[in-house]
């Protein structure tokens, strides 16, 4: 029903991914491939575009009010897709998930106190934590059998006592790791033992590849609901990142009141277009998502097979997301050398060291793009690194 092979020229559309590629990476937009920032080169579900068209037709995009349909759409989606019965009153709206992390820093910690990250991890977390004057506590994930794992015993030994929050990326970005129920319960127990608020960024929880299963932290560790904030959004799932609309779902009333107070202090109000797009996506985008996941799975297989054929290059098996996490350590190149080879191939990708300790020899590639571009990226990288092409 949906054409994910359609080439869409996003250049000269104020598109961060394509129009900033040359300035940030030195890769000319003319024949370069933008595989860095995490949005997709696909049209959103028709229901989203129809909602935007109806808004334009009515002609007056004023302040948004009456969010009952929006809350109902979120609750319906969480129940259908995740088996999670969400109380509509538990939902707070933020201008995106990263903003939600910032508000959590303000609500649950004081300046100078620690916020724990499991690295390598999405680099915007560290940026917003630092911007709020909190101390970044980086704890490196352990790799066993090609998979990332948390070493909570080691982390416990390193705590200084002023840590207040864990920001938990689930599924994990980068690396696409889906955490098991047991792992999440162990983390919840750790948070209780050390009196930490658990902020679970689950923005990628719908982008789970066929045959895998993600369980939200709210169901994996119900005993931690009194210290849990789950951050979600339609933006990654349905490729509407510019909507800048996210949700903080906070089951505990006391915790919710503290977070709501910080959001209110910022003077924000909902992004009208973002809320309308999110409502439409959750209400009418499910068939589109099902086809997308099958298409993305094909892209993952093609990219992993192509990169795996290059000597010294090891793809990380993806459970979820559309972000391929590729280890170039076996090539013997330095991080600078790896990044230079990728740029010389005419590809803008995210350097692994942006994601913190443990990412130095990796590159992250956004493969949510038509298959022909994925195949071309494979060809270029095989040439650049002396692979099979």
Image (cartoon, rainbow, N blue to C red):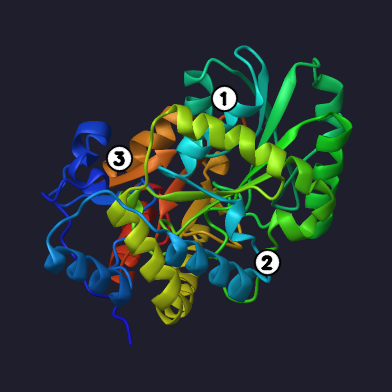
Residue under label 1, please give it.
106
The label on residue 84 is: 2
Query: Label 1's element?
Result: helix
Say which label, 3 or 2, has the lower sequence index: 2
- Which percent across, then down, holds residue 121? 57, 38
- Is any atom of residue 14 visible in this view? yes
Q: Nearer the viewer, residue 170 or 140?
A: 170
Mark-to-mark CA distance, 3 and 1: 38 Å
- Residue at 85% x, 46% y is 186
Q: To which quarter of the image does residue 212 belong? A: bottom right
Query: Label 3's element?
Result: helix
Q: Quadrant of the N terminus?
A: bottom left
Q: Quadrant of the C terminus?
A: bottom left
Say which label, 2 or 1, has the lower sequence index: 2
Residue under label 3, please give it.
343
Mark-to-mark CA distance, 2 and 1: 27 Å
């Amino acid at each position: 029903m949906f054409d994910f092979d359609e080439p869409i020229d996003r250049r000269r559309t104020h598109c961060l991914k394509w129009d900033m590629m040359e300035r940030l990476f030195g890769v000319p937009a003319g024949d370069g491939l933008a595989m860095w920032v995490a949005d997709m080169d696909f049209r959103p579900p028709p229901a989203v575009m129809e909602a935007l068209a109806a808004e334009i037709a009515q002609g007056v995009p004023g302040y948004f009010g009456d969010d009952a349909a929006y809350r109902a759409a979120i609750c319906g989606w969480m129940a259908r897709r995740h088996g999670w019965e969400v109380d509509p009153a538990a939902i707070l709206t933020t201008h995106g998930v990263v903003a939600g992390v910032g508000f959590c820093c303000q609500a649950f910690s004081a300046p100078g106190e620690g916020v724990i990250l499991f690295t390598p991890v999405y680099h915007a977390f560290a940026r917003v934590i630092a911007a709020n004057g909190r101390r970044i506590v980086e704890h490196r994930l352990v790799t066993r059998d090609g998979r990332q794992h948390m070493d909570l015993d080691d982390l416990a030994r390193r705590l200084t006592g002023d840590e207040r929050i864990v920001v938990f990326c689930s599924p994990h970005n980068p690396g696409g790791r889906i955490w098991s129920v047991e792992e999440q319960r162990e983390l919840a127990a750790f948070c209780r033992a050390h009196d930490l608020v658990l902020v679970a960024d689950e923005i990628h929880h719908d982008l789970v590849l066929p045959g895998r299963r993600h369980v939200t932290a709210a169901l994996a560790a119900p005993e931690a609901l009194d210290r849990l904030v789950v951050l979600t959004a339609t933006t990654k799932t349905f490729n509407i990142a510019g909507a800048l609309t996210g949700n903080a779902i906070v089951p505990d009333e006391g915790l919710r009141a503290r977070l709501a107070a910080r959001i209110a202090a910022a003077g924000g109000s909902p992004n009208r277009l973002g809320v309308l797009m999110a409502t439409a996506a959750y209400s009418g985008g499910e068939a589109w998502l099902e086809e997308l996941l099958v298409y993305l799975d094909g892209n993952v297989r093609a990219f992993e097979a192509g990169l795996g054929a290059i000597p010294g290059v090891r793809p990380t098996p993806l459970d979820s997301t559309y972000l391929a996490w590729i280890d170039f350590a076996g090539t013997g190149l330095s991080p600078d050398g790896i990044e230079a080879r990728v740029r010389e191939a005419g590809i803008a990708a995210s350097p692994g060291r942006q994601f913190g300790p443990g990412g130095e020899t990796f590159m992250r590639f956004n493969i949510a793009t038509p298959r022909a571009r994925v195949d071309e990226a494979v060809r270029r990288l095989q040439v650049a690194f002396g692979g099979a092409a």
